[in-house]
Every structure is written in C-alpha cells, then in structure tokens.
Amino acid sequence: MSMRWGVVHRWANPLMTLRSTSYFLPVPQSARVFVSRPIYYNTKALKSAANTELKSVANTDTIIATDENYGRKEVISVNPRLYEYLLANVREPQILRELREETATMRGSQMQVSPDQAQLLAMLVQILGAERCIEVGVYTGYSSVAVALVLPEGGQLVACERDAKSLEVAQRYYDRAGVSKKVRVKFGLAADTLKTMIQNGEGSSYDFAFVDAEKKMYQDYFELLLQLVRVGGVIVIDNVLWHGRVADPLVNDSKTISIRNFNKKLTEDERVSISMIPVGDGMTICRKR
Ligand SMILES: C[S@@+](CC[C@H](N)C(=O)[O-])C[C@H]1O[C@@H](n2cnc3c(N)ncnc32)[C@H](O)[C@@H]1O
C-alpha cells in the first residue's frame, strides 16, 4: 500500500476534539476518497484516528474496482487476511494436509496447487460425474490425490510426470489414500504419453483433464487433450495468470509470452467454452463443445 503524508480528516473519526494544531500522519493513497476537509485534533485522539483510518483502509483495500468500467460491480482482490479466511473454509482431507506438509520441505513445493484449487478440481470432477481423468504434471501428487479421492470405484486417473523422484512421493500417497487402483502413472514426457493414448484409440473417452506442467507446451497439451476429452468434458489449465506477469506489458520473458499467447488463442477458440478464474495462480476451465 503506498503512503503519503497528510492531515487526518474529519471523516476518519467525526467524534474527535477540535484543536488549534494540525498533525501530519502517513495516510494511504487509497484513503484519498474519504478526505473531506481538514480538522485539528489532540494527540491522543489523533493516534486513535490513525488506527481507525488504517484499519478501515485494510478493509477497503480488498476492493479493487467499483467504477463504470466494471459495471459499478464491487470487485475484490484477495489479500492475505481474506485468503486466510478462505483457506479456513476449505475442507482439506487429512491425507492431503499431510502431503502438503511433507511437500513443503521439498524443492519446488511452490509448484503444488493450493488447497482451494484442489477442492475446486475435485468439485468439477464430482459435478461432471467424471470417471476417466488425465493429469499432466503430477509432482508429489497433491492435485492427483484430490481428484482420485472423489473418483468412483472403477474410475481412473492417468497421471503424467517426467520426474521419478516426485513420483515416488506421489505413489506413497496414492497408497496411503487408498487410491492406487484408480491411478495409472505414466512416467515420461507428457506429450508423448498423450500421443500414445490417442494412437491407442482412447480419443474422446475422457471426462476431465488438468494441465499443470511445462508452460511452453500448453498449446500442445491442449490440442492433444482436446482429442482425448469427450464433448462436454472439461480441461482445466493452471497458472494462466502467471504471478500477474501476463498483465504486465513490461514483462516479456519467453514463458510469460507463451502463456499470454496461449490465453489469447484460447479466448478466440470456438471449440471450447471458457472461464478464467483468479484462484491460486489463475486457472481456466474449458468445456469441449
Ligand atoms: C507445477 S508441477 C505440478 C504440481 C501438481 N499438479 C501438484 O498439485 O502438486 C509441474 C510438474 O510437471 C512436471 N513436468 C514438467 N514438464 C513435464 C513434461 N514435459 N512431461 C511430464 N511432466 C512434466 C514437473 O516435473 C513437475 O513435477
């Protein structure tokens, strides 16, 4: 939050005493909308005013837009306090919590989907009544366990991963979660696995796919998965907001450009209905038409 120095104003606390001296305190830029006209306070009242002001700004800081560009809709952004609240409302199975805690000690743990993302994936699988799923990018298995747990008996998840060490952890948790029978691990490059599945006649036989691997391969994964998923099936793509970099014109590294291009192409792709949502690092849900 950016600060500027300014007079504390009446609107901050209308009950305070009038005095002859003005005091200057840091006032957040975003509080400027509340400013009316200057009024002078005693020191004690001033401190309390500052607290009130800063607390209320912490609240209003979550609201990022209310103007006509957004149809006057009050659009919010998730700040740490709100995100903690959101997480407190996630039902994370004990086995996933343990996997998350173990993964937190490992290299690359930031790659794992967040509990709210995993819950959304599981919810989509359940809404779809999905029985046949694919995951591209397993890592230690957090999202794949979340999906496998809600698959019916006889359901199947094809889990594509090129890193054997991560797969060892994932496999251990498939066993512990009692979902090993539902998960078909495919070790190797995901694009090769998907191509083989198409060649084996598995086209249009999957209900759900989740993409969370090499960013520069997103378009390739998407094209292959579009062949494997049935009409009405869903493909979810992770990291589509790429830490916010996709919206920053000054960021032009190859991964950001690749995701930006992918997002643009997807928006224009009539083969799918889409919904981009700011959960985790951003996900796009695509439904095959
Ligand atoms: C972001 S992580 C996946 C996180 C996982 N979905 C979770 O929630 O824990 C990406 C994973 O994709 C794997 N990966 C990257 N490129 C791949 C490729 N070409 N083929 C298969 N796996 C790949 C990486 O080894 C890594 O484990």
Image (cartoon, helix red, strand yellow):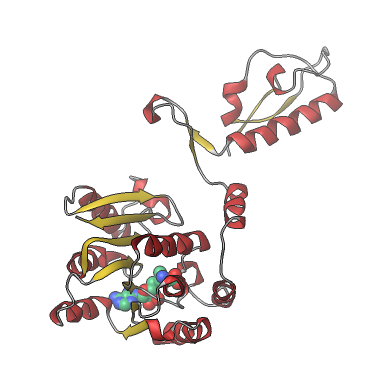
For the C terminus, the image quarter is bottom left
User: Where does ligand 1 appear, by image quarter?
Assistant: bottom left
Left-right relation of 283 to 106: left
Residue pictured at 69% horizontal, 36% vertical: 55
- Measured as percent of width and height from the top left, residue 143 is found at 44, 70
Residue pictured at 56% horizontal, 59% vertical: 90
Taking depth in this image into account, of 181 and 4 the one nearest to the observer is 181
Q: Is residue 252 above or below residue 139?
A: above
Count of numbered marks: 0
- Measured as percent of width and height from the top left, residue 232 is found at 24, 59
- Measured as percent of width and height from the top left, residue 133 is found at 32, 72
Whether residue 221 is visible, yes or no, is yes
Specify the quadrant of the image occupied by residue 184.
bottom left
Q: Is residue 256 above or below residue 200?
A: above
For the N terminus, the image quarter is top right
Residue pictured at 21% horizontal, 65% vertical: 230
Whether residue 163 is visible, yes or no, is no
- Measured as percent of width and height from the top left, residue 127 is found at 38, 59
